[in-house]
Image (spheres, grey):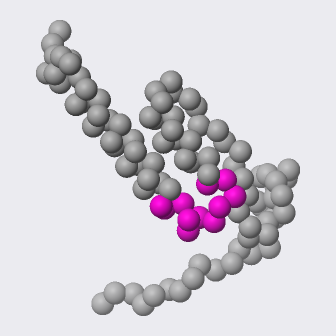
Amino acid sequence: MPDPDPGPAPLPTDAALDAARDLAPEAAPITGEPLPLGVEPTRTGHPAVDAALARLEALDGVPTEAHVAVYEDVHQRLTDTLAALDRDDPLGSTARNDP
């Protein structure tokens, strides 16, 4: 018999919040609001890949629930870019395996 739904995760205890503050004392107070990560993707030099990765920059400060749609879009763009590489290969995919 499956376990009943445990419900939402418990809120962090004061000790857990203190420990988090000790690890990152310069961080903003824990308010429940999303904080920007301030991470910029490394440019690859491939325009289609760079455009897809640039979409990730839109996630800074956005609630986690909204990330899924952006991740799916980036994944699809990267998948399409990889597929296009195979279609555009003038030597054919088997030529890459030759010594």
The outermost residue toward the top is 99
Up the image or down, 45 lies above or below 36; here it is above
Label tally:
0
What is the magenta segment's predominant secondary structure? helix
Q: Position of residue 8 (x, y in %)?
A: 57, 82
Q: Residue at x 61, y 54 (%)?
A: 59
Q: Position of residue 13 (x, y in %)?
A: 74, 75
Left or right of 57 on screen, residue 30: right
Residue drawn where x is 40% and y is 48% of the image: 75
Whether the magenta-drawn stretch holds residue 62 is answered as: yes
Residue at the spot 74% in from the left edge and 70% down from the top edge: 32
Compared with 65, 92 (above or below) is: above
The reply to whether residue 97 is visible in this rendering is no
Classify residue 61 as left or right of residue 87: right
Q: Nearer the viewer, residue 9 or 93?
A: 93
Instruction: Return the x and y of residue 4 as percentages of the image width and height.
Output: 42, 90
Q: Which residues are magenta?
A: 59-69
Is residue 67 among what the camera can see? yes
Q: Nearer the viewer, residue 47 or 95?
A: 47
Residue at 73% across / 58% down in the picture?
A: 35
In the picture, the quarter occupied by the N terminus is: bottom left
Give whichever of 24, 16 is nearer the camera. Answer: 24
For the C terminus, the quadrant is top left
Q: Assess whether residue 91 is covered by the magenta stretch.
A: no
Q: Residue 36, percent across and down?
A: 72, 53
Q: Is residue 53 above or below residue 88?
A: below
